[in-house]
Image (cartoon, helix red, strand yellow):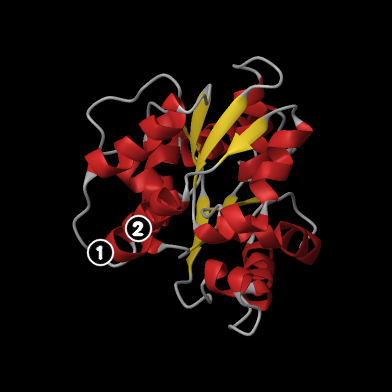
Amino acid sequence: MHKPVLGILGGVGPLATAYFMELLIKKTPARTDQDHMPMIVFNDPQIPDRTAYILDHAKPNPRPEMAKVARWLEEAGADYIAIACNTAHYFYDDINEAVKIPVVNIMEETSERISSLVLAGSTVGLLATEGTVESGVFQGYFERYGLRCMAPDPDGQARISHLIYDCVKANQPYDEQEFLEEAYRLRDAGCEAVVVGCTELSVIYQELSRHPKWLFDSLDILADRCVKIYETARAANGHIEM
């Protein structure tokens, strides 16, 4: 029986990729090693910074390298692909068009999940990179599911960017409380749910001693979806159903 292989476009960033793999392993209903999903991981930290390019197109373009990694994963035997980075989904169409196999969309999966848990027209807070916020891509997915979106104010966004770039990406200590304070600011401003919309912030999220019910980690949702695809496809002799 063919067991579907997940390809992970990783390295964006490296620690978030490792955390994503850990999530997949922990979420798989396995009793033995052999029950776990096969993965091919291309951890490519040399991909140019996504936010830098989104904010300034004169900066190196990550699009060609990400499309190349996706093709490599497909050629290596992946049956479907996940991207362990929210901001990279600014380039989702290009990556998706570069391969013939399905590419799971973290933004669509997250928006769909949240829409099933809150009332139509609710406001959702977004904690993400400046590139993700400024591009409006995540907001577009929320709108498709009838949700409004709210990002932090400029000072709050600066604090979030500091946590992402100066702490997690730089492999430096971070303050979980500072992260939680920004989430609570959005909650207090009227957000029914707040989304952890950056995989570096997902690394901080996992360290929290408690997780408010209204705080949702996009990487956790992506892992849920990838495991579901795997389990369903395994039962169907490897056929991927998206």
Amino acid type at circle 1 is Asn
| Separation of residues labelled 1 and 2 (CA atoms) | 9 Å
Horizontal side of 20 relative to 170 (left or right) equals right
> Where residue 146 appears, x then y in whole percent?
75, 27
Q: Which residue lies furthest to the left in this view?
A: 173
The residue that label 2 is drawn on is: 15
> Where residue 33 appears, x then y in whole percent?
38, 38
Q: Nearer the viewer, residue 179 or 68?
A: 179
Horizontal side of 122 relative to 126 (left or right) equals right
Q: Are marks 1 and 2 in contact (CB under 8 Å)?
A: yes
- Against 58, is 187 above or below? above
- Foreground: disc 1 or disc 2: 1
Check the picture and name the quadrant holding the C terminus: top right
In the structure shown, which secondary structural element does the residue marked by tag 1 occupy?
A: loop
In the structure shown, which secondary structural element does the residue marked by tag 2 occupy?
A: helix
Judge the density around disc 2: few (<14), some (14-19), many (≥20) Cα neighbours within 10 Å: some
Amino acid type at circle 2 is Leu
Judge the density around disc 1: few (<14), some (14-19), many (≥20) Cα neighbours within 10 Å: few
